[in-house]
Amino acid sequence: MPLIRPGGLVLDLAAGNGRHSRILIERGFAVRAVDRDTSALLTLAGPCCEVSQVDLETGAPWLLGAGYDGIVVTNYLYRPLLPAIANALAPEGILIYETFARGNERLGRPRNPDFLLCPGELLKAFAMFTVIAFEQGEVTSPRPAVIQRIAAVAGPLDRLPERPI
């Protein structure tokens, strides 16, 4: 998060209850929180946060715009959106993506392989970006799960403005 342009526009995709949107707003970012069910997000709506109710899985063209300084996606996977997510990031924008991976089916939900990443899948999906960090494997907190996470920048790392991490 410290690498996102200060005050920049961040897309919280499949925002759920707004946990990440709240943190981003507190840190001075402009946020667009998107989810199929926005009932938990409505309290965040205001000058720093646009709340959009969108069913991301209808097959409709990408409606969420582009030029985001950051995109945050957690605990959500709909593979057809991965190229649109990549294209929506501004040059030097930061992607933070974490979700469940194969192996999670033995620990809990989700168990459906449609919602579990294959080994290295985020690396492949965002190969056009410069990877800052990547992890995959089993975690114990907040609950036992198998996850995959990536932090990446749109463009070469040497073009990133200097910001404390």
Image: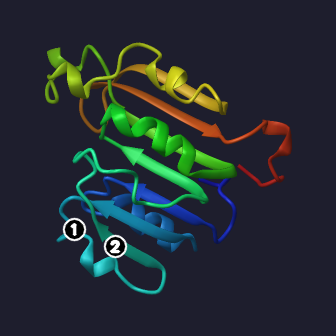
Residue plotted at (47% across, 26% down): 122
Question: Dot 2 corresponds to which residue?
Answer: 51
Q: Position of residue 142 (x, y in %)?
A: 29, 39
Circle 2 packing at 10 Å, graded few (<14), some (14-19), many (20+), is many
Label 2 secondary element: strand
Q: Position of residue 43 (x, y in %)?
A: 27, 80
Q: Which mark is residue 38?
A: 1
Whichever of callouts 2 and 1 sits on the residue coming sooner in the sequence is 1
Q: Is the residue 103 above or below the residue 72 in the image?
A: above
Q: Dividing the picture into quarters, in which one does residue 131 lie?
A: top right
Q: Nearer the viewer, residue 21 or 114?
A: 114
Q: Amino acid at mark 2?
A: Val
Label 1 secondary element: loop
Q: Is the residue 27 above or below the residue 43 in the image?
A: above
How has the structure been colored for display? rainbow
From the viewer's perspective, tell me whether residue 62 is left or right of residue 154.
left
Cα separation between marks 2 and 1: 7 Å
Q: Amino acid at mark 1?
A: Thr
Residue plotted at (84% across, 44% down): 159
Discs 2, 1 touching: Cβ within 8 Å: yes
Q: Position of residue 26 (x, y in %)?
A: 50, 73
Residue plotted at (27% across, 23% down): 116
Residue plotted at (48% across, 72% down): 25
Q: Position of residue 6 (x, y in %)?
A: 68, 67
Q: Nearer the viewer, residue 90 or 18?
A: 90
